[in-house]
Amino acid sequence: MTPSAPATERGYVKAARDAVIETDLDRYLFPIDCPYQLKQILDDDWLPD
């Protein structure tokens, strides 16, 4: 785990919460933990499937 991984997780939790509020979708529809590694998120050439 990198030193910034906890910050990534906190950011993901906030983003998921905001998505629930904005979309009216149930929280259980979003993964509990960020499904992407920090290295993937920071890679300009990487996009999830």
Image (cartoon, helix red, strand yellow):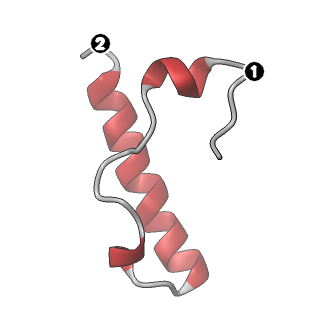
* 10 Å crowding of disc 2: few (<14), some (14-19), many (20+): few
Which residue lies most toward the right here?
45
Residue 5, x across and y down, in percent: 31, 24
Q: Position of residue 37 (x, y in %)?
A: 42, 28
Task: Give the total of numbered labels.
Answer: 2
Q: Is residue 33 toward the left or the right of residue 19 in the image? A: left
Report the residue marked by disc 1. Answer: 45
Closer-to-camera residue (29/14)? 29
Which residue is under mark 2? 2
Q: Amino acid at mark 2?
A: Thr
48 w.r.t. 37: above or below: below
Rounded to the nearest whole Å, what is the CA distance between mark 2 and mark 1?
20 Å
Residue at screen point 34% across, 30% down = 7
Report helix, strand or loop for mark 1. Answer: loop
How many neighbours does mark 1 have within 10 angstroms: few (below 14), some (14-19), or many (20 or more)? Answer: few
Say whether marks 2 and 1 touch (CB < 8 Å). Answer: no
Please identify the quarter of the rendering in which residue 32 is found. Answer: bottom left
- Residue 25: where, in percent of width, then height? 49, 84
Q: Earlier in the sequence, mark 2 or mark 1?
A: 2
Q: Residue at position x 69%, y 35% from top?
A: 47
Does 45 sit left or right of 25 as displayed? Answer: right
Mark 2 vs mark 1, foreground winner is 1
The amino acid beneath tag 1 is Asp
Q: Quadrant of residue 40?
A: top right
* x and y percentages locating residue 23 in the rendered image: 59, 81
Instruction: Give the quarter of the figure containing the N terminus.
Output: top left
Eyeballing the image, is 35 above or below 20?
above
Q: Is residue 32 rendered to the left or right of residue 47?
A: left
SS for callout 2: loop
